[in-house]
Image: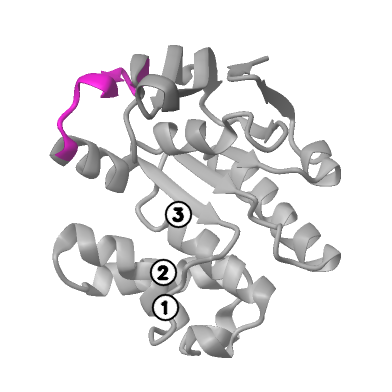
Amino acid sequence: MSTLLEVRGLVKTYGEGEAETRVLKGLSLGLDEGELSALLGPSGSGKSTLLTILGTLMKPSSGQHVMLGEDLTKASDRDLTEFRNRHIGFVFQFHHLLPDFTALENVIFPAAVRAGRETAQARARGRELLVRVGLESRIDFLATKLSGGQKQRVAIARALMNRPELVLADEPTGNLDRESAIQVMDLIAEINAQEKTTFLISTHDEKIADSCRRRILVEDGKAR
């Protein structure tokens, strides 16, 4: 496997003076192409901050973040937005679907943002993905008409819309019952195996972590 991303000596500090809080304390980590990894750690350990930085939604206070050979700590906000849209997908605990949009419209939204409009090609890709995640019969349903597990499947399809190399999932099963959680993780594992998409999944659920091939523990601002 070749290296997809590497962060070295990441430091992230919030506030100043007496209010200063250092969340990441020289964290270093690498991910290879095609990995399926669980990100573990207690609340306040820095997991969410790390995911936010890896997703290019925030820059570290210091350190280096390299992905696909690009040093993202030196990139402009505009370049980061373009890089994120092209190479990174997101799945959240609270799926963040647009309630007035259909399943298909939610899935193709990242492509519509990228192209500035909906295209026939994007709609075809969106339909293909919804069939892939088992929602062929729900393609034209409004998001409000879907179950929790179905909404999370739509969120996974949306994350894959632009064929990203990396998908960051923040507690993707945290709002689901056990059966739905297992189905979502089975789907993620299948996509990872077949398409070699790298997944980094933040979770507190040991059973979800057990279904990943690697565990990364973040503790006191560092990873091991």
Q: Position of residue 98 (x, y in %)?
A: 41, 77
Instruction: Please name the residue that numbered disc 3 is placed on.
Output: 160
Please name the amino acid that badge 1 sits on: Leu
Please name the amino acid that badge 3 sits on: Leu
Give whichever of discs 3 and 1 has the lower sequence position.
Answer: 1
The magenta stretch is 64-77
Q: Name the element at disc 1.
A: helix
Dividing the picture into quadrants, the one containing residue 86 is top left
The answer to whether the residue labelled 1 contacts the one labelled 2, judged by CB atoms less than 8 Å apart, is: yes
Which residue is at 44% across, 38% downward? 52
Please name the amino acid that badge 2 sits on: Val
Instruction: Please name the residue that numbered disc 2 is placed on.
Output: 107
Q: Residue 77: which disc?
A: none
Q: Position of residue 55 (x, y in %)?
A: 40, 38
Which residue is at 70% across, 24% downward? 217
Is residue 194 positioned above or below 215 on the image? below
Task: Give the spatial CA distance, label 3 vs label 2.
Answer: 9 Å
Give whichever of discs 3 and 2 has the lower sequence position.
Answer: 2
Which residue is at 36% across, 24% downward? 60
